[in-house]
Amino acid sequence: MSDLSPSLADPLKEANEPSSPVARFGPEAPLLMDCGVVLDHWQIAYQTYGTLNADKSNAVLVCHALTGDQYVASRNPITGKGGWWTAMIGPGKPIDTDRFFVICANVVGGCTGTTGPASTNPATGKPWGLSFPVVTIRDMVRAQAALIDSLGIETLFCVAGGSMGGMQVLQWAASYPGRVFSALPLATGAKHSAQNIAFHEVGRQAVMADPDWRQGRYLEEGTRPSKGLSVARMGAHITYLSEQALHRKFGRKLQDREAPTFSFDADFQVESYLRHQGLSFVERFDANSYLYVTRAMDYFDLAADHDGVLARAFAGTKTRFCVASFTSDWLFPTADSRAIVHALNAAGASVSFVELESDKGHDAFLLEEPNLFATTRGFIGAAARARGL
Ligand SMILES: CC(=O)SCCNC(=O)CCNC(=O)[C@H](O)C(C)(C)COP(=O)(O)OP(=O)(O)OC[C@H]1O[C@@H](n2cnc3c(N)ncnc32)[C@H](O)[C@@H]1OP(=O)(O)O
Ligand SMILES: N[C@@H](CCO)C(=O)O
């Protein structure tokens, strides 16, 4: 397996050169959003890696998760860190940029260059804030389709992503069935569960309870609701891990001390770790974007868009699917993936399914998981042969 699991020891060393540094696409056509608003002026920030072939048949669209960005396989200029999926994408890697043209775009509502609540509303000259229209997963995908059109790509060879990225993969397959040759939804679901909505609501309330949030107008008022956003991330981060992973990493070990301090300082390593996750998050993410993007996930319910029957979302599909879940993922448990697979089978789709053994929880899809790399390599390789690539 060692050739399938590139080292993550130095993510910057692993980072690739994007073929489109800081590309921005500002379409002439307005974006019609599910909430009924028409966004006249908008843009998408995206990165590409590898080379588009002559007949434009080798494009892989990678969709990012909740707080991801377009820097999927190259240095992120905001954090200075390597891309979030450098283990998966690059020359010779499971999504091989020597063969495929990889595109990754920041979602609408996001905060790394694509239009979102922190962008300026041209009508007022001020940040949109909460006057930005509520975004759905389908809006994100509609915007990506405009980008893909602009690149002259009719059919994507593959659409891949985990978590909220996986929701976009499913939405792509449902909205544009003729434009997706293969689809790789990972650690995801066809709807957000009540428990997941509940966790998101706790996070949003933490943001909105911060007095520096200023009813969403903090950019105009020169404040930042860092404390609220940090607490939101701390809570959410627990859901991305697992009990086993927390025990393995930290157990009940104390942080830089021999004994409890009888205070509310971060005595335990796990407390110090969560504080670090919260603090580093607020340096790279906008609080209002957090409200909008979590909401988009909450609203996602693909069956509801098809008379309550998920299989109808995939009726007549020719797309080849590979669905994967992780054993320790309690945020998007294997049952969620099975529901997708049942619907795909009912729709007569070509689908394979794998439940990957891992104790790393939901975020396992972001980590060095040799079995995930092997699955991806195998699925993409077979699809490429079927596509004649
Ligand atoms: C698909 C997408 O779109 S990507 C989405 C956006 N990106 C992410 O969500 C990535 C952020 N998430 C993470 O980092 C998640 O923790 C994981 C699970 C993916 C990473 O897992 P791992 O690589 O195992 O890292 P781990 O969870 O141990 O965290 C390491 C960090 O915690 C810090 N840390 C570890 N122990 C402690 C401690 N006791 N006290 C304080 N900080 C600590 C490390 O210094 C390191 O900090 P750094 O990231 O600033 O360098
Ligand atoms: N930890 C990842 C996945 C969450 O689903 C993120 O923040 O985007």
Image (spheres, helix red, strand yellow):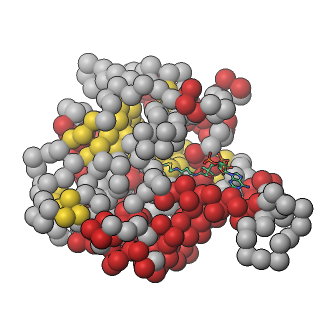
On screen, residue 369 versus residue 99, left or right, reads right
Q: Relative to the observer, which residue lies in front, 222 or 181?
A: 222
Measured as percent of width and height from the top left, residue 308 is found at: 38, 72
Q: Residue at x 47, y 26 (%)?
A: 16
Q: Relative to the observer, which residue lies in front, 225 or 371?
A: 225
Q: Residue at x 62, y 31 (%)?
A: 10
Count the marks: 0
Residue 57 drawn above or below residue 81: above
Q: In which quarter of the image is the N terminus?
A: top right
Measured as percent of width and height from the top left, residue 111 is found at: 35, 54
Residue that protrudes farthest toward the right in the picture? 258
On screen, residue 6 versus residue 295, left or right, reads right
Q: Relative to the observer, which residue lies in front, 40 or 266?
A: 266
Q: Relative to the observer, which residue lies in front, 299 or 17?
A: 17
On screen, residue 135 versus residue 236, left or right, reads left
Measured as percent of width and height from the top left, residue 2 is found at: 71, 26
Residue 345 drawn above or below residue 129: above
Q: Which residue is drawn at 23% across and 66% down?
A: 128
Q: Quadrant of the C terminus?
A: top left
Measured as percent of width and height from the top left, residue 49 is found at: 39, 28
Q: Which residue is drawn at 33% across and 31% down?
A: 21
Q: Is residue 23 visible?
A: yes
On screen, residue 144 versus residue 309, left or right, reads left
Q: Can residue 312 be seen in this view?
A: no
